[in-house]
Amino acid sequence: MTACTETAAIPKACACLVDARGRLLVFSHPEDGNMQLPKGTIEPGESPEFAVRRELLEESGIDHAGALVSLGTLQRDCEAGVEGNTHRHPQLWHLFLIHAEGPLPEHFDHVAMGSPEEDGLVFSFSWLAPEAPIDGYALPYRQAIERVRAAQALAAAQPVAAG
């Protein structure tokens, strides 16, 4: 048995924020050099829903009080040396689709807060268009983006209710 299978999965909450044009909020992490979605560890006693709101605020400065749509979970075996992790461990990501409640800038920077590992880091945010390639993203982010795109396609295919 490997050390990874002996360890309980670390729960994570991932915010998949989309704007009115169907674009997904992404950011460049200065220490990892890769594009990511806002996410972080669910703290003891927190619900995934509370954690995703907290992580979105800490990493982007966006305080979202509106609806959350669960996109399920995904398992990730996080390698050592990835995203600042010092050891290999399993993660369980809780994915949430969030619709922006108003317009946001095309590009903006935010100084991360709330996490000892990320406090003071500057995250540079931008928008990923629905048709943009995602091959430059790490596997779990590609999986999350694919779920967002599938949910958006399903919603677009639903008939509009007569009012």
Image (cartoon, grey):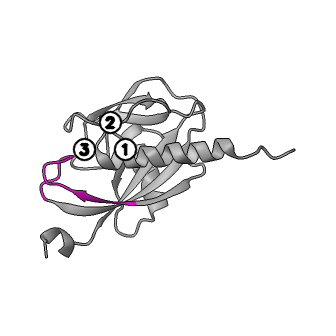
Identify the residue at horizontal 13%, vertical 58% (top origin).
87
Disc 2 residue type? Asp
Q: Position of residue 114 (x, y in %)?
A: 31, 49
User: What is the C-alpha distance between the residues marked 3 and 1?
Assistant: 22 Å
Instruction: Pick the quarter of the image with the N terminus.
Output: bottom left
Image: 103 above or below 63:
above
**Badge 1 vs badge 2, beta-carbon distance below 8 Å:** yes
Taking the magenta stretch, the answer to whether it contains residue 86 is yes
Disc 1 residue type? Arg
Instruction: Pick the quarter of the image with the C terminus.
Output: top right
How many C-alpha atoms fall within 10 Å of the one at disc 1: few (<14), some, or many (≥20)?
some
Image-based side of 129 in relation to 99, left or right: left
Q: Position of residue 152 (x, y in %)?
A: 58, 43
Q: Where is residue 12 in the image (x, y as percent from the top left)?
A: 35, 58
Q: Where is residue 156 in the image (x, y as percent from the top left)?
A: 65, 41
Q: Residue furthest top?
A: 106
Tell me the tag on residue 142: 1
Q: Residue furthest right?
A: 163
Secondary structure beneath dot 3 equals loop
Which residue in the protein does label 3 denote? 118
**Does the magenta stretch mainly form a helix, a strand or a loop?**
loop
- Point out the tag, 3 or 2, that comes first from the N-terminus: 3
User: What is the C-alpha distance between the residues marked 1 and 2?
Assistant: 7 Å
Secondary structure beneath dot 1 equals helix
Which residue in the protein does label 2 denote? 135
- Between label 3 and label 1, give the one nearer the viewer: 1
- Point out the tag, 3 or 1, that comes first from the N-terminus: 3
Identify the residue at horizontal 35%, vertical 45% (top origin).
141
Magenta-tinted stretch: 74-87
